[in-house]
Image: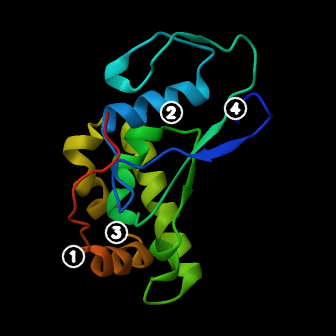
Amino acid sequence: ALRMSGGDHIHAGTVVGKLEGEREVTLGFVDLLRDDFIEKDRSRGIYFTQDWVSMPGVLPVASGGIHVWHMPALTEIFGDDSVLQFGGGTLGHPWGNAPGAVANRVALEACVEARNEGRDLAREGNEVIREASKWSPELAAACEVWKEIKFEFETIDTL
C-alpha cells in the first residue's frame, strides 16, 4: 500500500541489531520494495507474484541498535539503495555526534569499496572495518565503544 500511495521509504527490518528478523524474509521484503517484478516465494515471505510494472520503488530503511560493526552485513543485505539510520550508533560516539557520523561514513565507504573489489563481506567484514580504523581515529574509537554490544534474544519476526 505504501508503494501504491507514493511512499518513498519504510523500515524493512535489519537482520542485525536489535530489530532482527529472518534474513530471507527481510531480503524478500527488500526485493518487494525495489523490484518491478517478483515471483511468489513463501520461504521469503512473498505470498503471491507481484508485477509493479513501472511504479517507483521504495527505499528500505534499517535502524535499531546498528553500529559500525554491523556495516559489513548492512552493506551486503541492503546494497547501495537504502537508508541506514544510526541513532545511538552515531550519538553514542565518545567524541560526539559529528565524529560518530564520520565513523559510520568511513565504515560504509570501506565496506562498499571492499564489496566492489570482490571481497566477501560476510567472511571478511570485520577485517575490512579493522583495516579502515587504522587510518580513521573516529572509526577506531567507535569500534572500541561498540565491540562488546550484542543483542541476545530470539527473532520474533518469523514465518
Amino acid type of the residue that numbered disc 4 sits on in the rendered structure: Ala
Q: Secondary structure at mark 3?
A: helix
Seen at 22% across and 55% down, the residue is 154
Query: Which dot marks residue 5?
Result: none
Q: In terms of sequence position, does the residue under pointer 4 or pointer 1 come before the other?
A: 4
Could you tell me if the residues under marks 3 and 4 are in contact, i.e. CB atoms within 8 Å?
no
Left or right, 156 with respect to 39, comes to left
Mark toward the viewer: 1 or 2: 2
Residue carrying label 2: 30
Left or right, 1 with respect to 42, comes to right
Seen at 45% across and 83% down, the residue is 93
Residue carrying label 1: 148
User: Which colouring convention does the figure follow?
Assistant: rainbow
Crowd around label 4: few <14 · some 14–19 · many ≥20 (10 Å): few
Query: Observer-nearest residue: 106 or 79?
Result: 79
Left or right, 151 with respect to 132, comes to left
The residues tagged by marks 4 and 2 sit, at their Cα atoms, a distance apart of: 15 Å
Residue carrying label 4: 1
